[in-house]
């Protein structure tokens, strides 16, 4: 167990390990995505109130779930990098930030598209949408802070501090936005009963959530590998891998 | 010999000196004290011009207007918090000091808050009257701004410490800090809204106070870490 964790810190080892991981995780993720999309978009029954427009949840909900989890993954990597000074954690954090930002963006855009037929407008200041928007800003802040620093080692540490501060704040933000919403808009817009979602709609949704987790992992590992070969482009293991030596 | 030197200045004396030093620099340039107030005054003026002079509508929006403008004023000044210390090298001296950087930075943040947020909270009733905030809500506005501006300043100081080594970091500072300011804005403006309706003010103020205490405990750690990282970058 411990030797595995120690090996994770070694760039050449991680590069090979990540390559093997992507080699089997990518096909599995793609199959899950295809099966989930087919099941959700074609096989699952239409909603009795929203008709077929509800089917966008098979993209919207997985993106939102993984976007939030991605922030915690990023902050955890930041904490590991600050506490144990493991370089690989810096690289993981830097790789996760843009992926999470894109997922949050997907959740926002699909939410707006879903809102048009359901609520009649593209944008509603609903508690969940607002929280998602703030999460989007939090991600953008991390990405922008990393880009602004000239010293990239310092940039990673600064982003780690920022994402930890954000992690402490996320539950407070979510709760405060909830209270804000209930203070100003006493439940004039109701989501259709999501808790009572039928199993025939639930299973493809769960499948899509798993598939999106897989997609997140694959993208982050691929990002990390790209960052690793760029960072170590002068070292012999990269030159050997590329066939220069 | 270093041990004797370290004993010469206790932590509380160092805190107090750091507090005075920052306070003196603030007092030496009155424009730094007046500018946030002037900014507050002018931006509050923009709202009636943009929304129309209807007193009823303005007084309905007053809590939100006042709180958003207070947040912007705090954002505007927090960028300068560590700038001069970073430029003249005193930040490096602070890092070398035998006392925790987090505590010394807290002294500066506290002095900065007294000169900006605290002052702004005290004069806020003047501007509140201009946008027609009902008088019964004025005390709540002052208390909420006192507690809230402490949160805003502490969180802003984290952002300031993270961006102090970046040229033209002002816009970046807003980007990373505004999302973190959201709960403060919600708790603060909700307290004032409830005060205009004679509603439940205490729970919102209690939440604000909790947030202020939590940021007082946690923010200095992040500020200290961020300042060291900024020195690495600069």
Image (tube, rainbow, N blue to C red):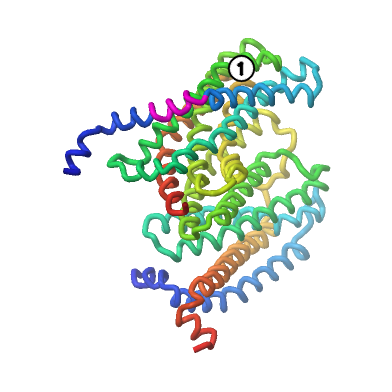
Q: Position of residue B201 (x, y in %)?
A: 56, 19
Specify the segment rendered in magenta. B20-29
Quadrant location, the N terminus of chain A: bottom left
Compared with A221, B14 (above or below) is: above
Can I make out residue B168 in this image?
yes
Residue B23, magenta (yes or no): yes
Whether residue B3 is situated above or below residue B107 in the rendered picture: below
Residue at image coords 65%, 63%: A208
Residue A101: which quarter of the image?
A: bottom right
Name the spot of residue A185 as percent of width and height, x first: 70, 31
Q: Which residue is painted at 61% across and 17% down in the image?
A: B195
Secondary structure predominantly adopted by residues drawn in magenta: helix
Q: Is residue A73 above or below residue A128?
A: below
Characterize the local packing of mark 1: few (<14), some (14-19) or many (20 or more) Cα atoms within 10 angstroms.
many
Residue at the extreme top: B135
- Is residue A239 depicted above or below A200 in this figure? below
Report the chain holding disc 1: B
Whether residue B3 sits left or right of residue A216 in the image: it is left
The residue wearing badge 1 is B195
> Measured from the top left, where is residue A18 in percent x and y?
51, 74
**A164 with respect to B42 (left or right):** left
How far from the left and from the top, in percent, is residue B149? 53, 27
The image shows a total of numbered marks equal to: 1
Q: Secondary structure at mark 1?
A: helix
Q: Is residue B186 visible?
A: no
Looking at the image, which is closer to me, B173 or A37? B173
């Amino acid at each position: 167990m411990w030797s595995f964790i120690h090996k994770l810190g070694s760039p050449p080892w991680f590069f090979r390990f990540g390559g093997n991981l992507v080699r089997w995780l990518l096909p599995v993720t793609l199959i899950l995505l295809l099966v989930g999309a087919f099941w959700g978009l074609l096989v699952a029954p239409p909603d009795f109130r929203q008709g077929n427009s509800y089917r966008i949840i098979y993209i919207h909900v997985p993106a939102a779930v993984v976007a939030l989890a991605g922030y915690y993954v990023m902050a955890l990597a930041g904490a590991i990098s600050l506490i144990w000074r493991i370089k690989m954690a810096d690289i993981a954090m830097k790789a996760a930030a843009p992926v999470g930002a894109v997922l949050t963006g997907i959740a926002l855009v699909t939410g707006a598209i879903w809102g048009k037929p359901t609520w009649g407008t593209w944008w509603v200041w609903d508690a969940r949408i607002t929280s998602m928007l703030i999460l989007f800003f939090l991600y953008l802040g991390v990405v922008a802070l990393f880009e602004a620093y000239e010293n990239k080692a310092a940039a990673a540490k600064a982003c780690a501090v920022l994402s930890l501060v954000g992690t402490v704040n996320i539950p407070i933000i979510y709760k405060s936005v909830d209270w804000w919403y209930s203070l100003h808009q006493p439940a004039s817009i109701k989501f259709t009963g999501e808790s009572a979602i039928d199993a025939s709609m639930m299973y493809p949704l769960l499948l899509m959530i798993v598939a999106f987790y897989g997609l997140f992992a694959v993208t982050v590992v691929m990002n990390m590998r790209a960052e690793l070969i760029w960072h170590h482009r002068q070292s012999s293991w990269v030159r050997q891998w590329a066939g220069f030596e | 010999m270093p041990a004797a030197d370290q004993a010469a200045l206790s932590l509380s004396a160092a805190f107090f000196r750091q507090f005075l030093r920052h306070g003196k620099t603030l007092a030496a340039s009155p424009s730094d004290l007046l500018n946030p107030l002037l900014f507050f005054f002018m931006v509050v003026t923009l709202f009636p011009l943009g929304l129309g002079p209807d007193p009823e509508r303005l007084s309905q929006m007053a809590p939100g207007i006042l709180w958003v403008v207070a947040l912007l004023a705090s954002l505007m000044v927090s960028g300068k918090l560590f700038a001069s210390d970073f430029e003249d090298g005193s930040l490096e001296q602070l890092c070398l000091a035998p006392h925790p950087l987090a505590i010394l930075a807290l002294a500066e943040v506290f002095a900065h808050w007294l000169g900006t947020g605290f002052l702004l909270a005290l004069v806020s009733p003047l501007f509140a009257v201009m946008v027609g905030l009902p008088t019964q809500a004025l005390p709540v506005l002052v208390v909420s701004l006192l507690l809230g501006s402490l949160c805003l300043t502490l969180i802003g100081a984290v952002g300031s410490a993270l961006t102090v080594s970046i040229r033209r970091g002002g816009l970046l500072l807003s980007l990373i800090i505004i999302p973190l300011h959201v709960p403060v804005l919600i708790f603060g403006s909700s307290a004032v809204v409830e005060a205009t309706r004679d509603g439940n003010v205490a729970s919102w103020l209690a939440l604000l106070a909790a947030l202020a205490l939590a940021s007082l405990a946690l923010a200095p750690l992040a500020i200290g870490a961020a300042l060291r990282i900024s020195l690495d970058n600069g």
